[in-house]
Image (spheres, rainbow, N blue to C red):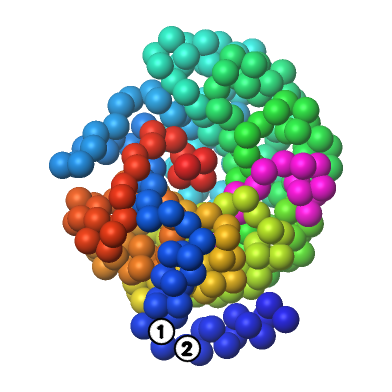
Amino acid sequence: MIDKRIEELRAEPLGRLLEYAWEIRTKNFPPILNIAAPSPKTYITDHYSNRPNRFVNISITGTSCSLNCEHCKGQLLGSMLPAKTSSKLKELGDKLIKKGCSGVLISGGSDHTGHVPLNDHFEGIKYLKDMGLKVIVHTGLVEEETAKMLKAAGVDQVLLDVIGSRETIEKVYHLDAGPDAFKRSLQVLKEHGLAIAPHIVIGLHFGKIMGEYDALRLVTESEPDVIVLVIISSALSTGMEDVEPPAPDEIARLGAVARILNPKTKITFGCASPPQTRKKTEELIIKAGVNTITYPLDETIDLAHSLGLRTDFKEVCCSLV
């Protein structure tokens, strides 16, 4: 049923889709555009400037990742603070709290089966929660043992990239798995009562749209707390070094379809946005009905105001807003 609806919507003219998506947003949400400005990136605009150390990204594997995915090659991990043991997590948490930190994203590289090795970090994760921090965890594939641990630790949210194409999973993630593995992970997380924020990386297959709408179907069926849309971007020394991101129209179309299929679910536009198409993409994605946008341009904020939206700035990961 969802597959048929997706195909119908994809066939609609973009202008009509955006109008429909905007109507749904207006009906179901207040006229507020949330703006996420977490501290891993310095954000200084005419409208707002964020502060260091308010929200921090942590890798429990340092820069190590067995998959060595084409779009990352461990570079994203290199921008995070390392904490490879529970004791290191506790030490880091104490230091961050003294610096005014209010929340952390815990992530790490995957093993060869696509799982981030989180299970040995229960004590550290729970300690961060007990100290009053917001704690979200960006996992790979999830088994029941990990879901139980995350629930017992009291994490606020679980983030999971969802991929709808086996070819993309194999060629980009170097993982011998299909979309059903991501479907199962979503099910396991929901079964254990965890709040989920599935991510769809638009253009993950070397800039091409391949499997994103299949991923959207899986995400929609999981009835998530929030949906996060992210755009692939080129990165030096990776398999995506020369990649051309999808056109703004394609990104907005996916965003509008996501809004129409999920009329009451918060939708967030994440922090990876290619500079060459950023202004147009942000303009269209707001018109597609997203609730939150990350690190937007000043012009984008002005546009939101012209559309009758108030803006509310938050120094946390976009999925938490």
Which picture quadrant has residue 30?
bottom left
Depth order, front residue of 97/231: 97
**In this picture, residue 281 sits left or right of residue 222:** left
Gap in angstroms between the C-alphas marked 2 and 1: 7 Å
**Residue 300 visible in image:** no
Q: Residue at x 71, y 59 (%)?
A: 222
Of residue 253 and residue 304, the one placed in the foreground of this image is 304
Q: Amino acid at mark 2?
A: Glu
Q: Which residue is mark 2?
A: 12
Q: Is residue 281 above or below residue 39?
A: below
State the SS at label 2.
Answer: loop
Question: Residue 16's mark?
Answer: 1
Quarter of the image for residue 42 reads top left
Residue ID at (39%, 34%): 315
Mark 1: secondary structure: helix
Q: Are marks 2 and 1 in contact (CB under 8 Å)?
A: yes
Q: Quick one: which residue is furthest to the left in this view?
A: 46
Q: Which residues are magenta?
A: 187-200
| Residue at image location 71% in from the left, 49% down from the top | 141
